[in-house]
Amino acid sequence: MLSSSVDGAVDRIDAALDVLSSLDLSALGADELIRLAGRCETLARRQAVLAADIALEVNRRQAADLGGAPLKVLADWLRITPAQARRRATLAEPLAPRRTLDGQP
């Protein structure tokens, strides 16, 4: 179960996507349509970064906490290949905050 703040944030994104999906795109002007495409592309890229960060965090967890090998569990849950799950985690690793051996950021 997600924390209430995380669950609420995801619910708001889901609701916004419902609204956007129901738009009559043919009613938009050419400029509006291009701007919407740009905004959607930016959102998709931000979502991809979040997905990679999540995969990295899952990969850092203990197998016992997840019920199996971290990226295998993630791949099964998301219905993607283990290679895709590993790729997400690998992409995020160089950008992730580092911690010292004693846990300090």
Image (tube, rainbow, N blue to C red):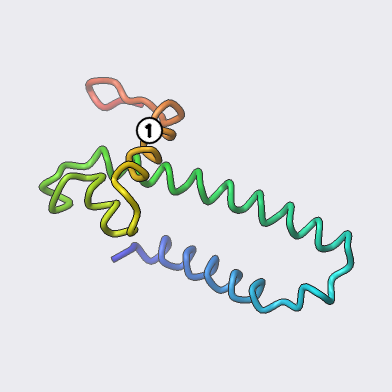
Q: Quadrant of residue 105?
A: top left
Return the residue nearer the eye: 16 or 80: 80
- Tell me residue 70's x, y (percent): 22, 45
Is residue 9 placed above or below 96 in the rendered structure? below
* Dot 1 amino acid type: Thr
- Tell me residue 90's x, y (percent): 38, 33
| Quadrant including the N terminus | bottom left
| Mark count | 1
- Tell me residue 94's x, y (percent): 43, 26
Q: Quadrant of residue 24?
A: bottom right
Residue at the far top in the pictured view = 101
91 vs 42, left or right, is left
Return the residue nearer the eye: 93 or 75: 75
Q: Which residue is mark 1?
A: 90
86 vs 46, left or right, is left
Is residue 59 placed above or below 13 in the rendered structure? above
Residue in the picture at 42% in, 31% down = 96
Is residue 12 placed above or below 78 in the rendered structure? below
Residue in the picture at 84% in, 76% down = 27
- Tell me residue 95's x, y (percent): 46, 29
Residue in the picture at 23% in, 48% down = 72
Residue in the picture at 17% in, 51% down = 66
Looking at the rendered structure, the secondary structure element under dot 1 is helix
Residue at the far left in the pictured view = 64
Q: How many other residues sit within 10 Å of disc 1, few (<14), some (14-19) or many (≥20)?
A: some
Is residue 9 placed above or below 87 in the rendered structure? below
